Image (spheres, rainbow, N blue to C red):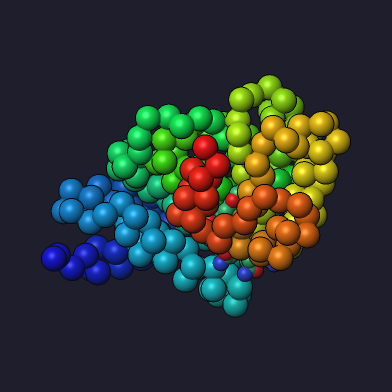
Amino acid sequence: MSDFTGAFNEISELLQKGRAKEIVPAVEKALSSGASPADILEKGLISGMSILGAKFKNGDVFVPEVLVAARAMNQASAALKPALKEAGVEPLGTAIIATVKGDLHDIGKNLVRMMVEGKGIEVVDLGIDVPKEKIVEAVKGSEAKVLLLSALLTTTMPAMKEAIEAVNAAGLRSKVKIMVGGAPVTQGFANDIGADAYSPDAAAAAEACAGFY
Ligand code: B1M
């Protein structure tokens, strides 16, 4: 079996430096050499973003560097998308995804969307900073069986609770299963706010989401 450690490290480095132009060919090269898309994602991209996240926390890098890295992450993830999707099957149905109100983080959400799409589920992506009213409207106006909510800030976790309460108040709760996730979210929090599921990462979220169809 080939060892792709060098390729994963290079991708991780390019991500941390925010080299959007160079990272896409590096991802494509790793794919054509036979590295699995899931490994490129986990051991290259997510690993690079975790290292950068630790530096951000320590004050070694700042918002501009993180933004450039985020752009590289989104472009590299988009380059991986067809390969991740290839494992998919016939469309199982539809899901809705959103980063909740007040929260601008979308990298994790985008990865969850891609992995869910890889399971053959069509995903309506409402974007970031999505108010509860827009979530309710989307649930009402679609045949989606699952609503996926992401939050990366402790300060935006309450917006998940508010979104679930709004879905309840609109009489739509029996129409959708609701899954929550994102770095600060826990199973206990999911239970407390009445979500149907919690997943710690994109792969687990896709598995759990497919289980609802
Ligand atoms: Co922000 N930020 N950020 N940031 N940022 C964090 C989250 C933080 C932990 C950094 C830190 O201090 N160590 C911290 C939050 C602290 C807290 O609340 N406890 C933080 C902060 C404080 C802030 C600002 C307030 C900074 C400021 O302005 N002073 C600000 C807030 C803006 C806002 O949202 N209103 C801010 C801004 C930003 C940028 C815009 C610069 C940028 C976002 C760019 C973008 O997303 N397009 C950014 C980034 C990139 C980060 C870090 C470095 C990386 C986040 C990320 O993308 N991770 C982050 C530090 C870190 O996480 N180490 C940080 C990679 C991604 C793949 O992981 O999103 O966790 P994640 O997704 C995972 C899982 O969580 C899970 O699956 C994904 C893949 O496996 N998952 C789900 C996610 N959603 C799910 C949904 C599910 C299931 C699983 O079901 C539905």
Side of 8 relative to 102 (left or right): left
Residue 65 in the figure: left or right of residue 17:
right
The quarter of the picture where residue 137 lies is top right
Q: Depth check: give the residue in front, 194 or 26.
A: 194
Give the number of callouts.
Answer: 0
| Residue furthest bottom as drawn | 58
Q: Nearer the viewer, residue 6 or 135?
A: 135
Q: Residue furthest right?
A: 169
Q: Position of residue 50 (x, y in %)?
A: 49, 68
Q: Residue at x 61, y 73 (%)?
A: 57
Residue at image coords 43%, 51%: 72
Above or below, comparing residue 16 to residue 19 in the picture: below
- Asked whether residue 150 is in view, the answer is no
Pinpoint residue 198: horizontal percent, then vertical percent. Answer: 62, 56
Residue 203 at x, y percent in the picture: 45, 54
At 38% from the left and 48% from the top, the residue drawn is 76
